[in-house]
Amino acid sequence: MRKFVIIPVLMLLWSCDSKTEEQSTHENDTESKVETSSKVIAGSDTELDLVHKLIEDSGNEILKSYAIVGGGSKLGIELFLENKTKFANSSVRMTTEEKQLLKDQGRYGLIEIVFALDAVAVITNAEVGVDSLSIFELKKVFKGEISNWQELGGENIPIKVYRRNDDSGTNDFFWGKMLQSSYADNATIVETNNDMLTMIETTPGSVGYLGVGTIKDKLGKPSDKVWAVNIYIEGDEAKSPYSLHDVVTDNYYLARPLYQYFLIEDKDDFKELVNFELSPEGQAIIKEQGFFPITEEYSTLNQFYLEKLAE
């Protein structure tokens, strides 16, 4: 652990145990919008505002008739598999089993696009006083094995853990990379990135995680009520979730791609958006919104699908 000089960063939360009342309400809101409209883009809360901005700036008249809703990556994929949404945003990749389910339904021609990169930031309340933590230390914090920031060189403040709900792709990603075991018994569940940010900003001793783009305001300035923890593997240098170089080179431990899914049969509705997102203008907007442009590696993978969209 390393002490720090305060600088801003954060994310949003909520509370509970397994499936909370708030989580059910969040899911129901998304599902009700899906049921009342045949034109819905659903899924990742991390991608929600970014995709809305990209659609607005693309000038795509077709997509302006679509409702854009969150609910979480897992819910978005679930609705896509149930044929209740034509387009799913997801901060985690569809599994081989999920892709096979589509084929079993006779639904072929899946398009998988990586349109942006993201960094999951571990954020603390700004008064905590810890600048950097190792992967090992973070695991112990989120498992509840360290209970006071003083144990990590910070202030004498009890640690309050916040986590995302089980429909969240960010939760899936963080759990798989960081935990792979149970969260602290007293961890509080929150529904969205914005909820996470609000809770960390206002709760002494709090710690949570979210997509780094959520932390910044419209001017690109991070919240001064939170701190984005620099993360390091033992024996290596600490990396910041704000570092373009460390995220695009995958040197930041919690860097990840952001996905979008639809079927080739619906390409007339979505190919214009995809082409705009991947254009220099679209990638510049992605960067302005606090996310990161895709690398040449992902551009090459996307090309396979772009050729199908051009047919």
Image (cartoon, helix red, strand yellow):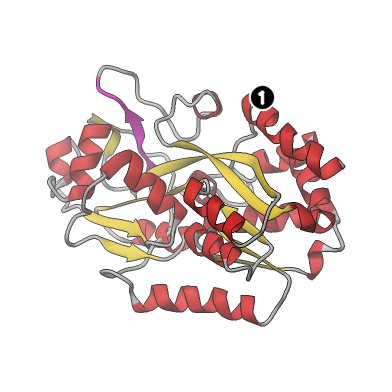
**Residue 109, position in %: x, y?**
71, 50
Which amino acid type is marked by label 1? Glu
Dividing the picture into quadrants, the one containing residue 176 is: top left
**Residue 67, position in %: x, y?**
70, 70
Q: How many other residues sit within 10 Å of disc 1, few (<14), some (14-19) or many (≥20)?
A: few
Please name whichever residue, 107 or 285, is drawn nearer the observer in this view of the structure: 107
Residue 138 in view = yes
Please name whichever residue, 110 or 186, is drawn nearer the observer in this view of the structure: 110
User: Which segment is the magenta one?
Assistant: 228-234
Please name whichever residue, 241 or 189, is drawn nearer the observer in this view of the structure: 189
Residue at 83% x, 49% y: name it.
272
* Quadrant in which the C terminus appears: top right
**Residue 94, position in %: x, y?**
52, 49
Residue at 24% x, 60% y: name it.
187
Q: Is residue 185 left or right of residue 189?
A: left
Q: Was residue 230 drawn as part of the magenta stretch in this picture?
A: yes
Q: Is residue 12 left or right of residue 84?
A: left
Residue at mark 1: 296
